[in-house]
Amino acid sequence: RLALISTGGFYIEGEQEPFDEPDMHGRYDIRLLPVTTPTESLSISHTHYDHTAANEDRQVLLPVEHLNGMVDAGEIGSLAPNIVSFMGYQPDVTRVLDETIPSVCAAVADMDADAAILIPA
């Protein structure tokens, strides 16, 4: 079972809080996105990278279709039920170590993932 982790700042509009940080200190929380959610319906709220490629093709940062093809081909067993998404702009390393990393690791462990792939934005 493979878990997909993205630093692209994806969230489900209308259901989850956007990542737009209120100040220069960044955001250190995560969002869990059901892997069955059509990637085109996910919104991006991350102000520290150019969204052009991701807006044209979400598979750039959330390669769910490609990974599902690998599942269908028997190359990997399955995908974890949720994508772990967070905002990659996190300038306070202490908060990354104390907040983000434990949250990501707990989410991946809760999904019984054997491995994870991190897609940086």
Image (cartoon, helix red, strand yellow):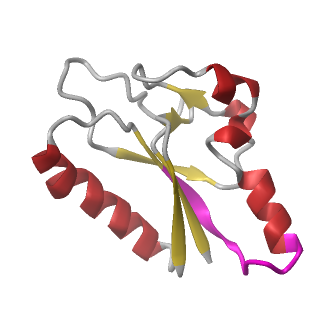
Direction from residue 51 to residue 91 in the image, left or right? left
Q: Looking at the picture, tell me which residue is in the foreground, 19 or 60.
A: 60
> In the rendered structure, does residue 88 fall within the stretch colored magenta?
no
At a point 70% along the width and 32% down the height, the residue shown is 41
At a point 18% along the width and 56% down the height, the residue shown is 97
Picture coordinates of residue 23, whole percent (x, y): 20, 18
Picture coordinates of residue 59, whole percent (x, y): 72, 42
At a point 44% along the width and 69% down the height, the residue shown is 108
**Residue 43's quadrant in the figure?**
top right
On screen, residue 26 above or below 81: above
Direction from residue 73 to residue 67 in the image, left or right? left
Picture coordinates of residue 71, whole percent (x, y): 80, 72
At a point 62% along the width and 65% down the height, the residue shown is 81
Q: Start and end of the magenta stretch?
A: 72-84
Picture coordinates of residue 56, whole percent (x, y): 75, 24
Direction from residue 95 to residue 42 in the image, left or right? right
Q: Looking at the picture, tell me which residue is in the foreground, 5 or 103.
A: 5
**Residue 88's quadrant in the figure?**
top left
Quadrant containing the N terminus is: bottom right
